[in-house]
Amino acid sequence: MSYSFKIAQVEKECVACGCCEPVCPRNAIHVLLGMIAQVETEKCIGCGKCAKTCPAAVITLVKREVVS
Ligand code: SF4
Ligand code: SF4
């Protein structure tokens, strides 16, 4: 059996502005010093709030399939 859900994915063009961090209801996206934003995939629920907030439009929601 398999099921799928969406998670946020950050493109390499991220400018590390940090705008996405405070809007995430799961505290699942973080900007580490000098790096692009990182998504904790096990926490992300695919709500899309980070993508709507990102001024550089570098967050997309991608389908993740899980086979169990
Ligand atoms: S899609 Fe929602 S839960 Fe996932 S990182 Fe973005 S704001 Fe957080
Ligand atoms: S809001 Fe967009 S550009 Fe800014 S840190 Fe988050 S992913 Fe990167």
Image: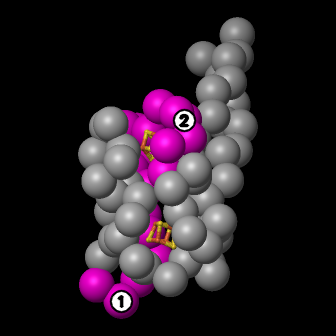
Q: Are marks 1 and 2 in contact (CB under 8 Å)?
A: no
Would you say 30 lies left or right of 2 here? left
Disc ID at residue 34: 1
Please name the residue shown 36% across and 48% down the image.
23
Quarter of the N terminus within the rendering: top right
Instruction: Identify the mark nearer the N-term, 1 or 2.
Output: 1
> Magenta region: which residues?
33-50
Label 1: how many Cα within 10 Å (few below 14, some 14–19, many 20+):
few
At label 1, the amino acid type is: Gly
User: Dot 2 corresponds to which residue?
Assistant: 46
Magenta segment includes 49: yes
Please name the residue shown 60% across and 17% down the image.
68
Would you say 26 lies left or right of 13 here? left
Magenta segment includes 12: no
In the picture shown, does residue 30 fall above or below 41?
Answer: below
Spatial CA span between label 1 and label 2: 25 Å
Some atom of ligand 1 lies within 8 Å of the CB belonging to the residue at label 2: yes
The local secondary structure at tag 1 comes to loop
